[in-house]
Amino acid sequence: MINGIKKFSVLIDGHKTSVSLEPIFWYKLKEIAEKENTKVSNLISNIDQNSRGNLSSAIRVFVVRQLCD
């Protein structure tokens, strides 16, 4: 689960975009989405709206912050 980067296409505000993350971040992002009763794409859209710069990095920061809470 730790090795490599996995690339997925997600729909953000009606636009398809690719996001590359390590599998552990995808796994945790899915867990967070389930806990919040939402879709991963909705989480990613919210992260994108509240961040500047690289989306993959913003997702990693979001996941780590969620784990620290």
Image: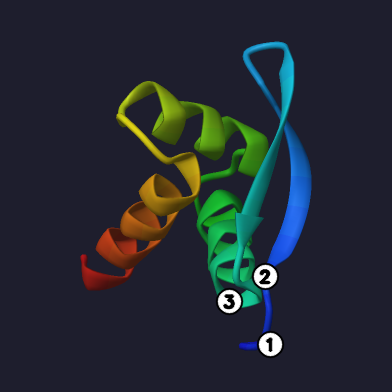
Asked if disc 1 and disc 2 are in contact, CB closer than 8 Å, the reply is no
Q: Position of residue 35 (x, y in %)?
A: 52, 56
Q: Residue at x 53, y 28 (%)?
A: 45
Residue occupying the point 32% across, 61% down: 66
Q: Which mark is residue 62?
A: none
Locate residue 57 relative to residue 36 in the image: left or right: left
Q: Foreground residue, 3 or 37?
A: 3
Q: Position of residue 31 (x, y in %)?
A: 58, 64
| Residue 39 in view (yes/no) | no
Are dots 1 and 3 in contact, CB under 8 Å?
Answer: yes
Between marks 1 and 2, how big is the CA–CA gap? 10 Å
Q: Which mark is residue 5?
A: 2
Q: Which amino acid, mark 1? A: Met
Q: Nearer the viewer, mark 1 or mark 2?
A: 2
Query: At which x and y percent is residue 26?
Result: 62, 63
Please tell me which of labels 1 and 3 falls first in the chain: 1
Q: Secondary structure at mark 2?
A: loop
Q: CA distance from mark 3 to mark 2?
A: 10 Å
User: Image quadrant for the N terminus?
Assistant: bottom right
Q: Nearer the viewer, residue 57 or 40?
A: 57
Name the amino acid type tagged 3. Ile
Give residue 24's mark: 3
Res 1 visible: yes
* Mark 2 residue type: Ile
Q: Check the image and report above or below for 51 versus 13.
A: below
Camera-side residue of 34 and 9: 9
The quadrant in which residue 42 appears is top right
Q: Residue at x 52, y 38 (%)?
A: 43
Q: Residue at x 54, y 67 (%)?
A: 25
Q: What residue is pinned by disc 1? A: 1
